[in-house]
């Protein structure tokens, strides 16, 4: 069989994109472990179930309508108009890989946006309403923002640069999380009447650290994969800038907390590395090694500062999703306008790109916040979004799923331990 050089190149690019799609999808395992580790044990199964729903219901939402809104033929710079259920003519995309390969890669991004929110609303949101939100996040909220930047919309027409999604993915997910948390309100016992915050301890930091490592690993699909070509030699630099920013964020997060509190905070080391990854995602293909380290270092400080600020404002985010993704996704988008080797303010490019980046990230952030706030308000009015106080105290795992994460013994009235299992609960 004769194989042309073009068909060989297309085949290699297809393999590359599918491999990267698998890496990005595997990040959901990282999210699940990270978030389960950061919450209390009595709600760890529930948070994993929410992440699984993002992978199931969210994936279907993106297939049914989300992809069409994001990558369909542009209408007024605002929305795509064809491609429902990934059908119809999509030649306008100009792909050299099958549409199915492009779709599965983009779908893995879409479910990540919903999963960012799952951590912020942990330990008190009802399971059913979350499923509805997960569908809407992947079918509407993310696709609209993605179309504006990547799908031929008005921000892309302005010249906004967001290579792998500091704005389109992370800022959107982060500021959607803020809106959700504001409507949902804090967990019981998180804040005193004077506004001071109590620490509701993570139940398994080693599990959270494992989740962070999986996310870091998956980012090598997230960022280099956005080239959509395994033949683009710039993927090597993208991998290096990705890694350097993560390393800088984790290092500075550690050193900053050591200086601030006298002991290095493991949770801030974890979130510092993730913040570095988030911040460099938008400019990973456009910045130098040194700039990636600077971006990651700033992110390592910003995440510590932002977690403290939100706590003071009564914004209860158990995993730090708003600080990691909202704050540093926004910073990462702006950083492109500062550090991009072509057009960045600090590289002699003037202020044009910087202004475009600021307009762009503010626009998608406002869209994400506003649309999520409306959705949560409607869900609250229609079906309720929060479990009762008694159910929250009992724990989301038993209340929502009828099972505990850990089969630990608990004392009984006669002092004899018994397994904490479903049959035991029924007997009571």
Image (cartoon, rainbow, N blue to C red):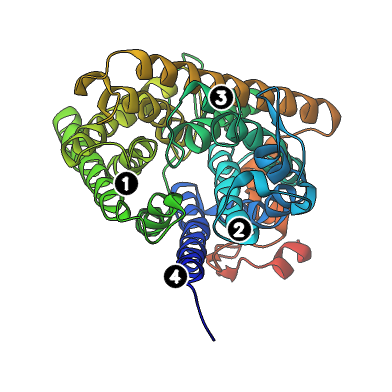
Q: Residue at x 48, y 56 (%)?
A: 24
Residue placed under numbered mark 2 in the picture? 104
**Residue 70 appears in the rendering:** yes
Q: Which mark is residue 158?
A: none
- Mark nearest the camera among 1 and 2 is 2
Residue placed under numbered mark 1 in the picture? 270
Q: Of callouts 3 and 1, which one flags the residue occurring earlier in the amino acid sequence?
A: 1
Residue placed under numbered mark 3 in the picture? 364
Q: Is residue 375 above or below residue 137?
A: above
Question: Alpha-carbon distance for marks 2 and 3?
Answer: 23 Å
Q: Of callouts 2 and 3, which one flags the residue occurring earlier in the amino acid sequence?
A: 2
Question: Alpha-carbon distance for marks 3 and 1?
Answer: 27 Å
Q: Residue at x 42, y 57 (%)?
A: 221
Instruction: State the image coordinates of residue 179 (x, y, percent, origin top left).
Output: 60, 24
Q: Residue at x 53, y 59 (%)?
A: 25
State left or right for residue 262 relative to residue 335: left
Residue placed under numbered mark 4 in the picture? 5
Instruction: State the image coordinates of residue 423 (x, y, percent, origin top left).
Output: 73, 70
**Residue 314 appears in the rendering:** no
Instruction: State the image coordinates of residue 51 (x, y, percent, origin top left).
Output: 60, 53
Q: Is residue 156 above or below residue 126?
A: above
- Mark nearest the camera among 2 and 4 is 4
């Amino acid at each position: 069989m004769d194989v042309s050089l073009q068909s060989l190149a297309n085949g290699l690019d297809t393999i590359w994109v599918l491999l990267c799609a698998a890496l990005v999808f595997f990040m959901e395992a990282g999210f699940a472990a990270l978030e389960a580790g950061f919450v209390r044990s009595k709600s760890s199964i529930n948070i994993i179930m929410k992440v699984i729903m993002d992978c199931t219901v969210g994936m279907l939402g993106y297939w049914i309508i989300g992809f069409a809104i994001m990558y369909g033929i542009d209408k007024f710079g605002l929305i795509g108009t064809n491609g429902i259920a990934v059908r119809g003519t999509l030649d306008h995309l100009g792909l050299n890989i099958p549409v199915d390969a492009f779709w599965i890669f983009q779908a893995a991004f879409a479910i990540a946006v919903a999963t960012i929110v799952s951590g912020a609303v942990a330990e008190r949101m009802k399971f059913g309403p979350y499923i509805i939100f997960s569908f809407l996040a992947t079918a509407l909220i993310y696709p609209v923002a993605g179309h504006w930047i990547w799908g031929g919309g008005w921000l892309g027409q302005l010249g906004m640069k967001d290579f792998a999604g500091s704005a389109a993915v992370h800022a959107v997910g982060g500021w959607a999380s803020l809106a959700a948390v504001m409507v949902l309100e804090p967990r019981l016992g998180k804040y005193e009447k004077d506004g001071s915050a109590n620490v509701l301890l993570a139940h398994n930091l080693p599990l959270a650290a494992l989740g962070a490592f999986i996310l870091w690993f998956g980012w090598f699909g997230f960022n280099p994969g956005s080239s959509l070509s395994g033949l683009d030699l710039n993927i090597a630099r993208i991998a290096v800038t990705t890694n350097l920013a993560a390393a800088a964020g984790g290092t500075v997060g550690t050193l900053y907390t050591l200086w601030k509190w006298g002991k290095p905070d493991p949770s801030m080391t974890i979130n510092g590395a993730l913040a570095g990854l988030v911040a460099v995602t938008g400019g990973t293909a456009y910045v130098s090694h040194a700039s990636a380290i600077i971006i990651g270092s700033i992110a390592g400080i910003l995440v510590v500062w932002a977690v403290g600020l939100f706590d003071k404002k009564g914004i209860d985010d158990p995993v730090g999703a708003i600080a990691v993704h909202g704050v540093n996704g926004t910073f990462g988008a702006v950083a492109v306008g500062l550090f991009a080797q072509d057009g960045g303010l600090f590289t002699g490019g003037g202020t044009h790109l910087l202004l475009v980046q600021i307009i762009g990230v503010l626009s998608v952030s406002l869209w994400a916040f506003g649309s999520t706030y409306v959705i949560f308000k409607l869900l609250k009015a229609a079906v309720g979004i929060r479990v009762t106080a008694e159910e929250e105290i009992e724990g989301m795992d038993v209340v929502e799923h009828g099972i505990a994460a850990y089969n630990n013994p608990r004392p009984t009235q006669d002092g004899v331990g018994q397994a904490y299992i479903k049959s035991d609960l029924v007997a009571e």
